[in-house]
Amino acid sequence: MQPVIPLNYKRTFVVAASPSRAFEEFVNGKGGWWPHDHRRGADGVLGVGFEPRVGGEWYERVQGGGRVHRGTVLAFDAPNRLLASWPLIFSPDADRQAIGESQLEVRFMPHVGGSTLVDLEHRDMHRTTNVELVRRAFFSPYGWDLVVSAYTAYLASEPWPVR
């Protein structure tokens, strides 16, 4: 049996907002910072959100007012930490059991000058039937690096635009 090699994305970065504001903007569902082409559903994504409780839904907010399921909230400690499951699905019709499930953990810590140190980790991405597809999706310049850059730029653009 081959050893399992963990496939995790981990990034620590600073955003120009207090921990409570950084947390709120990350989880509130308006998500004007979320790249609009990073979607699970067929409709255009307007943002992502997390229901503020353990067992709550992580969802995409889509054009037309609907929501598309992305995962489940496993821990919700506002404004410090969020942990959610993330099924590794690359089409709405994929078999959830066959693809695998990863976790997204984000921590928000006070930093100098009222800013926030954000520690983001997407882990257990090796729990999939297609590790190379996952690697290309999340570790390309259009994967997590783009999401982190968009979030950082959004928080630096106060007052925050509404989409």
Image (cartoon, helix red, strand yellow):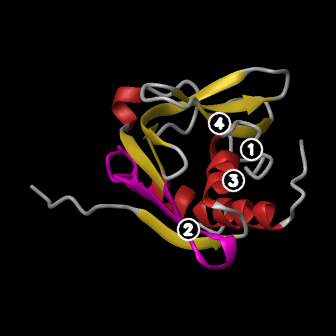
Alpha-carbon span between mark 4 and mark 3 = 14 Å
Mark 3 / mark 2, whichever is N-terminal: 3
Number of residues whose C-alpha sits closer than 10 Å to that of mark 3, classed few (under 14), some (14–19) or many (20 or more): some
Which residue was labeled with disc 3?
21
For residue 141, the mark is none
User: Please, is residue 56 above or below residue 162 in the view?
Assistant: above
Alpha-carbon span between mark 3 and mark 1 = 13 Å
Tell me the SS state at disc 1.
loop
Q: Nearer the viewer, mark 3 or mark 1?
A: 3
Which residue was labeled with disc 4?
49
User: Which residues fall within the magenta stretch?
Assistant: 107-133
Which residue was labeled with disc 1?
31
Mark 4 / mark 2, whichever is N-terminal: 4
Which residue was labeled with disc 2?
110
For the view shown, which residue lies furthest in the front direction? 113
Number of residues whose C-alpha sits closer than 10 Å to that of mark 4, classed few (under 14), some (14–19) or many (20 or more): many
